[in-house]
């Protein structure tokens, strides 16, 4: 039976791969795609999510959510994702957003689902946190929360913090305190998913479908990562999806995690206690290593199944 999931995102070049991978994978039953402002403003992320869903020929409903974090100001990441969030690659417009607001929809789907639902978060955690904090009893309908978020060492948005965690640390703290297991694809994991121009060329040769080719166009527009040596750019978000489809590609560690909510330079830093030094309750699982060739193979071949 496919795993029921809700995919909360902020597309975003790497979110685009995550959305397409999820929609191409029979292991997942994507109940909804919910969207927040993040990499770029909500007006762009929502349009991108709708366009990508239509490109995949999918009828999964796309819902608008939060355009800013729970506290503090909204800050985008146009340096990586471009002004429009997809590196300037223009896709045909998709269907209008489905009626309803992301947090309300997540609550309704949790309430109505016959089995617990997996929440996937690959952007700022605002929508998921709003859903769970406004009706905590529904948390028991959550199977697990799988996030691309955080880092156990240095950040990418600030020296201390990873972008999604930094964009809404209070929302992440709500998820970490909700009592359900939280799985982290951190920056250390996604650094292993470094996409080079040669890999993009190999993907392009896997098929002529519009989704695969658009994904390659999008990734080609992402500047190489200075943080990771300049050979390519990491594909963060599809790691979270791949974990649910093919967990054998990963090694993991159960640990405790919390997030720095202070106003200073450490704000948004995730304190991931991989060696259990704090003795805090084990509320998280970190994905530590990735079989990168296996991951890239999965990604390319699944996207090649799409139109
Ligand atoms: C995360 O932040 C965003 O820029 C990406 O889409 C990814 O979700 C990586 O830090
Ligand atoms: Ca993202």
Image (cartoon, helix red, strand yellow):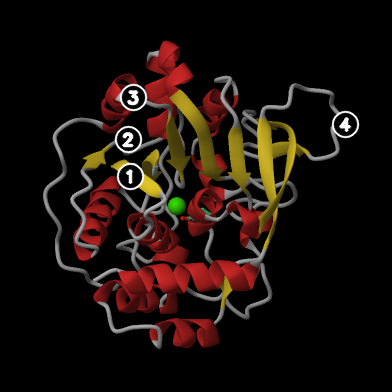
The residue sitting at 66% across, 52% down in the picture is 155
Tag in front: 1 or 4 = 1
Residue shown at 45% from the left, 35% from the top: 118
Provide residue 217's location: percent of width, then percent of height. Answer: 35, 78
State the mark number for residue 30.
1
Q: Secondary structure at mark 2?
A: loop
Spatial CA distance of label 1 from label 2 is 20 Å
Quadrant in the rendering for residue 182: top right
Choose the circle earlier in sequence order: 3 or 4.
3
Q: Is residue 70 visible?
A: no
Give the label, 3 or 1, closer to the camera: 3
Which of the two labelled residues, at mark 3 and mark 2, occupies the earlier sequence position? 2
Q: Say which quadrant the C terminus sits in.
A: bottom left
Q: Front-most of 244 and 220? A: 244
Sequence-first disc among 1 and 2:
1
Closer to the camera, 271 or 236? 236
Residue at the far front: name it: 1
Residue corresponding to mark 4:
277
Q: Secondary structure at mark 3?
A: loop
């Amino acid at each position: 039976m496919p795993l029921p999931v809700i995919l909360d995102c902020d597309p975003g070049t790497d979110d685009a791969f995550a959305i397409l991978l999820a929609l191409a994978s029979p292991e997942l039953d994507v109940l909804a795609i919910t969207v927040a402002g993040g990499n770029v403003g909500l007006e762009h992320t929502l349009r991108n999510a709708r366009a990508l869903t239509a490109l995949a020929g999918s009828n999964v409903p796309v819902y608008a959510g939060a355009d800013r974090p729970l506290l503090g100001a909204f800050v985008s990441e146009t340096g990586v994702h471009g002004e429009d969030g997809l590196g300037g690659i223009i896709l045909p417009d998709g269907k209008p957003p489905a009626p309803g607001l992301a947090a309300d929809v997540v609550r309704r789907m949790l309430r109505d689902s016959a089995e617990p639902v997996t929440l996937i978060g690959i952007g700022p955690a605002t929508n998921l946190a709003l859903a769970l904090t406004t009706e905590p009893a529904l948390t028991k309908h959550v199977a697990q929360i799988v996030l691309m978020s955080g880092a156990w060492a240095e950040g990418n948005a600030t020296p201390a913090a990873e972008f999604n965690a930094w964009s809404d640390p209070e929302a992440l703290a709500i998820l970490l305190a909700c009592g359900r297991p939280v799985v982290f694809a951190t920056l250390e994991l996604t650094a292993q998913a470094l996409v080079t121009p040669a890999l993009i060329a190999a993907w392009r040769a896997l098929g002529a479908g519009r989704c695969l080719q658009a994904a390659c166009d999008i990734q080609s527009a992402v500047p190489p990562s200075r943080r990771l040596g300049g050979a390519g750019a990491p594909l963060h978000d599809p790691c979270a999806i791949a974990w649910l489809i093919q967990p054998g590609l990963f090694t993991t560690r159960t640990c405790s995690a919390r997030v720095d909510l202070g106003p200073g330079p450490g704000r948004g830093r995730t304190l991931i206690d991989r060696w259990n030094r704090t003795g805090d309750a084990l509320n998280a699982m970190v994905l530590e290593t990735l079989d990168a060739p296996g991951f890239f193979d999965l990604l390319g071949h699944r996207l090649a199944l799409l139109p």
